[in-house]
């Protein structure tokens, strides 16, 4: 859970995409595809690191995204870490990060997490270059992760951030997670996205 978008270089652009629009998965996928191609490590499929816990509604965006990616068949094309069955959260993030670096030393890491933002940006997705600082929104000091970040703004920033996360609407969080998963598949493995679309007809 991020309070803001923690890019390593604050001068790098952050792209905002309204997940409520029907074209959001395609817009996200195209922009993500471009960022991957521009990155020095973008010649191989990225590692998708979905951060969060299923114990707090607002913070379940990451695990939901990982589970959607797996259900759509994305695990056949991409290494996916963080699902509802095996979440990556504050207690195991450092360990999982070490495992990823050891197993995939030269791979691009796409970090996916929920974030807090302004009321005007509720439901928006943000994408950019740099790392995430998970837990910043709830005053946790965790290791920074990712070469690219992708977040969904699940709640407005408030003094009681944890309460705001607990009160986030599951329908909204689920919709954003589905949109993110489709965008990732569009960018990295369109064959899986096509197969998932056919199954849903």
Image: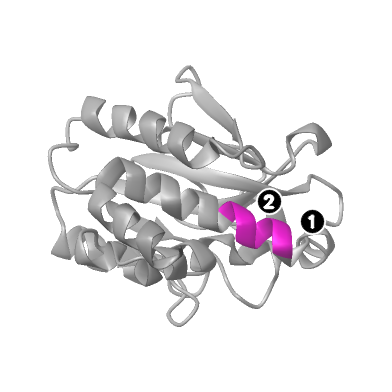
For the C terminus, the quadrant is bottom left
Circle 2 residue: 137
Q: What secondary structure prevails in the magenta region? A: helix
**Residue 57 pos. (x, y %):** 70, 69
Q: How many marks?
A: 2
Task: Measure how far apart labels 1 and 2 are at the Cα level.
Answer: 7 Å
Task: State the residue in front, 47 or 136.
Answer: 47
Task: State the residue in front, 53 or 34.
Answer: 34
**Residue 45 pos. (x, y %):** 19, 48
Mark 1, residues whose alpha carbon is within 10 Å: few (<14), some, or many (≥20)?
some
Give the residue at x 34% y 54%: 193
Give the residue at x 49% y 50%: 180
Q: Is residue 52 left or right of residue 35?
A: right
Residue furthest out toward the front: 201
Give the residue at x 52% y 50%: 179
Circle 1 residue: 161
Q: Is residue 92 above or below residue 10?
A: below
For the N terminus, the quadrant is bottom right
Q: Which residues are magenta?
A: 171-176
**Residue 188 pos. (x, y %):** 26, 46
Task: State the residue in front, 140 or 15.
Answer: 15
């Amino acid at each position: 859970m991020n309070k803001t978008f923690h890019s390593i270089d604050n001068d790098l652009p952050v792209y905002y995409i309204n997940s409520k629009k029907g074209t959001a998965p395609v817009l996200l996928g195209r922009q993500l595809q471009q960022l991957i191609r521009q990155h020095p490590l973008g010649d191989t499929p990225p590692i998708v690191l979905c951060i969060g816990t299923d114990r707090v509604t607002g913070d379940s965006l990451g695990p939901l995204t990982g589970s959607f990616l797996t259900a759509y068949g994305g695990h056949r094309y991409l290494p996916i870490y963080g699902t509802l069955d095996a979440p990556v959260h504050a207690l195991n993030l450092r360990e999982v990060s070490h495992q990823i670096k050891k197993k995939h030393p030269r791979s691009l890491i796409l970090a996916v997490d929920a974030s807090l933002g302004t009321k005007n940006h509720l439901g928006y997705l943000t994408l950019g270059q740099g790392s995430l600082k998970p837990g910043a929104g709830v005053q946790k000091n965790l290791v920074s992760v990712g070469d690219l970040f992708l977040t969904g703004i699940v709640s407005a920033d408030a003094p009681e951030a944890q309460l705001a996360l607990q009160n986030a609407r599951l329908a909204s969080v689920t919709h954003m997670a589905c949109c993110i998963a489709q965008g990732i598949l569009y960018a990295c493995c369109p064959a899986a996205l096509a197969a998932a679309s056919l199954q849903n007809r």
